[in-house]
Image: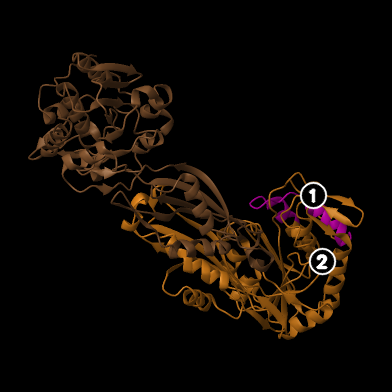
Chain colours: A brown, B orange
Amino acid sequence: MTVRLDLSQDAASLTAQLVDIPSVSGGERVLADAVEEALRAHPHLTVHRDGDSVVARTDLGRSERILIAGHLDTVPIADNLPSRIEGPLMYGCGTSDMKSGVAVQLRLAAHLVEPNRDVTYVFYDCEEIEASRNGLLRLANTRPEWLVADFAVLMEPTGGAVEGGCQGTLRVRITTLGTRAHSARSWLGDNAIHAAAPILTRLQGYEAARVVIDGLEYREGLSAVGIEGGVAGNVIPDACTVTVNFRFAPNRSVEQAFEHVREVFAGFDVVLTDAAAGALPGLDRPAAAAFVAAIGTPPRAKFGWTDVARFSAMGIPAVNYGPGDPNLAHKRDEHVEIALIGDSEERLLHWLR
Amino acid sequence: MTVRLDLSQDAASLTAQLVDIPSVSGGERVLADAVEEALRAHPHLTVHRDGDSVVARTDLGRSERILIAGHLDTVPIADNLPSRIEGPLMYGCGTSDMKSGVAVQLRLAAHLVEPNRDVTYVFYDCEEIEASRNGLLRLANTRPEWLVADFAVLMEPTGGAVEGGCQGTLRVRITTLGTRAHSARSWLGDNAIHAAAPILTRLQGYEAARVVIDGLEYREGLSAVGIEGGVAGNVIPDACTVTVNFRFAPNRSVEQAFEHVREVFAGFDVVLTDAAAGALPGLDRPAAAAFVAAIGTPPRAKFGWTDVARFSAMGIPAVNYGPGDPNLAHKRDEHVEIALIGDSEERLLHWLR
C-alpha cells in the first residue's frame, strides 16, 4: 500500500491524515514510506532512511544545528480509528502521542527552506515498546553522524508547554532473609517480613529532594512499587523483597543515584535491576534560550523519563515540546486540542525564521 | 481386597502390618474394613462403623470414660513403602504419623477386657487433608453420642511425651489502601506499601506471651506469613496486604484472640480469614492426673494445632501422646523408634488396669 501525504494542507488536517494511517509499533512501514516520499520532494532537504526511521536535514552551513524529533509509531489501536473531530478536539489513536507533533515536524521540514539554524528532522520507529527496538537508539548506535546537533526538541505531548530535560529512573530490589520454621513455633525461625520493617519505615520518612536546574524545579521520588514475601499460611517466611523505584533529578548520574539509594538503605542488600539516566534541560545553550523565548511560556521540568535522555547521552541538551495532551496518551479517548497544533507550528516557525 | 489383622502379635509387628496396608487420605477403606473386622471378633467391645471411621467401646458401667483416638490415613506415599527395619528404627509412610499409635490402640482394645475405666477407641479417616473431610469432625457432628468421654488421648506422634492441649490459630489480612499515580510523579499518589510500615514495625516489636496452664508453658507467636503489594514497576501502589498468623495459648478463645490482634493493629483494617480454637490440657481432671502419673514423664505444652481441639470443643479435655517422632511426620524418611511402641502400650496398660 502506498499513501501520498499532502504537506500543503494545514497541520491539523495533516494530523488527521497521519492518524488515519495505522502505525502501531513494528507496523510503521506504510507511514515511513509516505514520510520519506513526501520529504524527498523537497530539494532543500537531504533525506536518509534506516529501517522505518527517516531523517531529513538542511545543510546551509549555519553556526548552530538543532534537531526536531518525533516517533511514527503508536500504542495499539483501541477502537479509536479513524480520527474524528468533536468541536475543538480531534480524537483518535496517535492524535496526542504524537502524530500532531509529527504533522508540525513535516510542515516545518517542507516549508522552512532557509531556516536561521540548520535543522535535522528525525522520524523514528518503535518508541512505544521495549527499548531494545527503539529507532532513535538504533540511529544513535549505527548512524550517530545523522543526529549531531546543538540542541534537540522532542515533540512528545506536553500540551504546548516546554518541559526541560527529564528525570532519571532506577529500580532496586531490597531483600531480607530469615529462617523458615513452622508458625506454631515461630521462635525457632527468623521472620524475613518483620525484618523488612525498617525498609518501609525509611521509605515512609524519606524526604524527596527538589532540585532547581536552569530555573526548572525537578522533584524526586523514592517509592516502593512492589513487595512480596511468604511461603505458606503456617510458615515463618525466609525471604521478603521490596522493589523500589527512584526517580532522580538530572544532576545525578545513575551511579550517584544508586549510591544515594544504597545509603538510604544502608545495612540491607540492595541490588540494581534497571536504570536510565536523566537528561539535563540545557536551557543555557543559545539555541535553547532562543527556543524558550520563541515559545513564550515559562518552561517547566519534565518528571517522566522520555527519549530526551537519549539525546542527553549523546551530549545534546533536549526538551519536550508538543501539542498533544500528556494525560491522554495511551488512553482510548486520546485526543488533541486542534488549535494547539497550528499554534505549535507558528511558535516553531517564529524560532527558526 | 480383604486383609486380616493379627492383634495377637506384638505392637511393633502390628505396626509393620498396618503400615504395609496403604491408606492415603480418602483411600482408607481396606484398612478400616480390617480394623472393624478385627475388633468385631472381641465380644467385650461394641463396634460402630461410619464411613471409614470405626468406633469400639467397652460398656462396663465405670464411673469414668476415657477415649483413645487415632487416624487411619497417611500423607501420600513417598517411595517409602513397604516398611523396613534398620536396627532400632522402623521406616515407612505412617510409621510415626500414626500407625504405631493405631497399633497400640488396637492392642489395648483387644486385650483390655476389663479396663478400670470405660474406654472408647476411635479410628478415623481423612485427618491429613482439608478439615471439611475430617472423620472426627464428621463423627462429632453426626454421632456425638459415640464420642462422649471425660478425657481423651490422641495418639499423634509426641515421641512418648505427654503434650497437653494445643494452641489456637487464626489468620488475618491487614490491608492498607492508597492512591495510584505514575511513579515519576509520586507526590500525586499515596503509597500503600509505605503505609504498611507500622504493621511490620509492630510485628517486629511484638512481645509474645508465655502462659502457664495446668503447669504447662504455652508460647504464643504473632507472625507475618505473607505480604503482597504492587501494580507495576512505574506505579505507586494503591493496596498492600499483610497476612498475619496468631498462634495463641488455649486460655484465649478465638474471639479474645482476634480482639487482641485488632488491638495490636489498631488503626488498620483487620479481617479475620480463618481460625481454629485451642484446647485446654485439662490435666486437673482425675482421669488425666492418673494418666500423667502412669506415663511417668513431665507433660509439656503442645504448640501446634491438632485434633485435640475438636475434643476440647466438645467439652472433653485432651492430650497428645504417641510413640511416633513428631519431627519426622510427613517426611520421606519417616520412622519410629521401635522400643517406644511397646513402651507406650505398657504405660497405657498400667493406667487402665
Quarter of the image with the C terminus of chain A is top left
- Please, what is the three-letter code of the amino acid marked with disc 1? Asp
**Callout 1: chain:** B
- Please, what is the three-letter code of the amino acid marked with disc 2? Ala
State left or right for residue A251 relative to residue B287: left
| Camera sees residue A121 | yes
Please state the horizontal and vertical placement of residue B260, each as a whole percent of the image.
Answer: 51, 77
Q: Does the magenta stretch include residue B217?
A: no
Front position in the image: A279 or A151:
A151
Front position in the image: A162 or B152:
A162
Instruction: Tell if the residue under mark 2 belongs to the same chain as the one under mark 1.
Output: yes
State left or right for residue B183 relative to residue B44: left
Disc nearer the start of the sequence (2/1) = 1
Estimate how packed mark 1 is, as few (under 14), some (14 to 19) or many (20 or more) residues with alpha carbons within 10 Å.
some
Instruction: Give the structural element (helix, strand or loop) at label 2.
Output: helix
Tell me, for residue B110, which label it has, or none.
2
Q: Name the residue under label 1.
A: B20
Vertical placement of B117 versus B175: above or below?
A: below
Instruction: Give the structural element (helix, strand or loop) at label 1.
Output: loop
Front position in the image: A186 or A278:
A278
Vertical placement of A236 versus A121: above or below?
A: below
Viewer-side label of 2, 1: 1
Please state the horizontal and vertical placement of residue A163, each as a whole percent of the image.
Answer: 26, 44
Q: Which region shows up in magenta?
A: B9-34
Quarter of the image with the N terminus of chain A is top left
Distance of label 2 from label 1 (alpha carbons): 21 Å
Please state the horizontal and vertical placement of residue B316, each as a whole percent of the image.
Answer: 64, 78
Please state the horizontal and vertical placement of residue A273, each as a whole percent of the image.
Answer: 51, 44
| Camera sees residue B8 | no
Specify the quadrant of the image occupied by residue B133: bottom right
Vertical placement of A239 versus B276: above or below?
A: above
State left or right for residue A312 relative to residue A39: right
